Image (cartoon, rainbow, N blue to C red):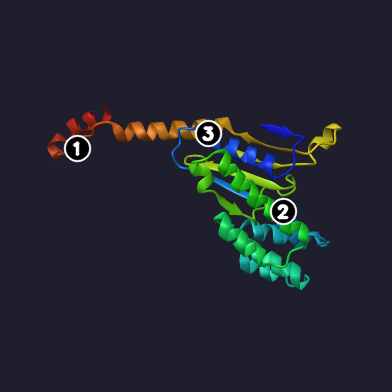
Amino acid sequence: VEFIGASGASADAELLALAAAAMETSHVPERSLDVGHVVLAELALADIEDDSLADTLKSCLRRKDRIGVARAACPLPKAQRALLEALPSLFGDPETTLERARLLRLPDEARQALADLEKTIAWAREQHEGSELLRDLTLDLGELRGFEYYTGMRGHAFVKGAGGPVLRGGRYNRLVERDGRQAVATGFAVDIEALAQAESALESHSMSHSKPGCVLVASPEHRRFAAAIARS
């Protein structure tokens, strides 16, 4: 799904609502939606000229290793260090997470990005009213997945039975430029194969537990008979 040429919270909200609706067509009951934004990670990792240090910090941030981040960030300026150390804990429900993020010393453009993200979530919930996925979504402002690719909001959806995200997406305003056109864009993709495998696994599990069961108790002299019953 690609939405090319539209910017702002309203476009992101439309895509987020559509992503939730797409996930809700699946037959997997245990689904979750995780939303984030690249602004704080970009700000925290900006102007680090030491590639080794940057790689170490990214590795620690991906693991949400607060102690590792704190140790690696020691040589950096105080404000940058404080933001880096905060990132691993900036996840949870959107309201609480955004409230904690606003307590940090942030430039105006970062605060505006967080305000737009808050609008995006609220407007998506309005468009797809009653959606459990949107109601219970988690916000992770320290997630680095797709960090080099996305330019704003990003999101992932997960289902029981799949080892990774079955839906990925977000805003990627620099992508269309590669094809020679200046245009902002946002969108998402669903891994249909992974979703189908999760549904199939769930159906197999459900069938194996829904058939009427029986318990066979066999004494040693009836072991051969018991084995024949078990094989059948």
Q: Residue 113 carries which label?
A: 2
Give the position of the N terminus as an image quadrant.
Answer: top right
- Residue depth check, mark 3 versus mark 1: number of the one nearer the observer: 3
Near-viewer residue (1 or 145): 1
Which of the 4 image quarters holds residue 95? bottom right
Q: Is mark 3 on a helix, strand or loop?
A: helix
Q: How crowded is mark 2: few (under 14 residues within 10 Å), some or many (20 or more)?
A: some
The first of marks 2 and 3 along the sequence is 2
Please state the horizontal and vertical placement of residue 189, each as a whole percent of the image.
Answer: 64, 34
Pick the quarter of the image with the C terminus. Answer: top left
Q: Is mark 1 on a helix, strand or loop?
A: loop
Q: Can residue 190 be seen in this view?
A: yes
- Left or right: where 200 falls relative to 60: left
Q: In this view, does 128 lie above or below 44?
A: above
Cα distance between the residues tagged 3 and 1: 35 Å
User: What's the amino acid at mark 3?
Assistant: Leu
Residue 215 is tagged as 1
Q: Gap in Å between the C-alphas at discs 2 and 3? A: 32 Å
Residue 208: x and y in percent read 33, 33
Circle nearer the viewer, 2 or 3: 2
Judge left or right: residue 14 versus residue 180. Answer: left
Residue located at (70% from left, 69% from top):
82
Q: Residue furthest right?
A: 180
Q: How far is disc 2 from disc 1 in space, using C-alphas?
A: 60 Å
Question: Is the residue 94 above or below the residue 133 in the image?
Answer: below
For disc 3, the marked residue is 195
Per the rendering, the mark at residue 29 is none
Q: Which residue is drawn at 71% across and 52% down?
A: 38
Amino acid type assigned to the residue bearing label 2 in the image: Ala
User: In the rendering, at what x and y percent does residue 51 appear?
Assistant: 80, 59
76 versus 167 height, above or below: below
Instruction: Inspect the image, locate mark 1, and give the three-letter code of the amino acid beneath it.
Output: Val
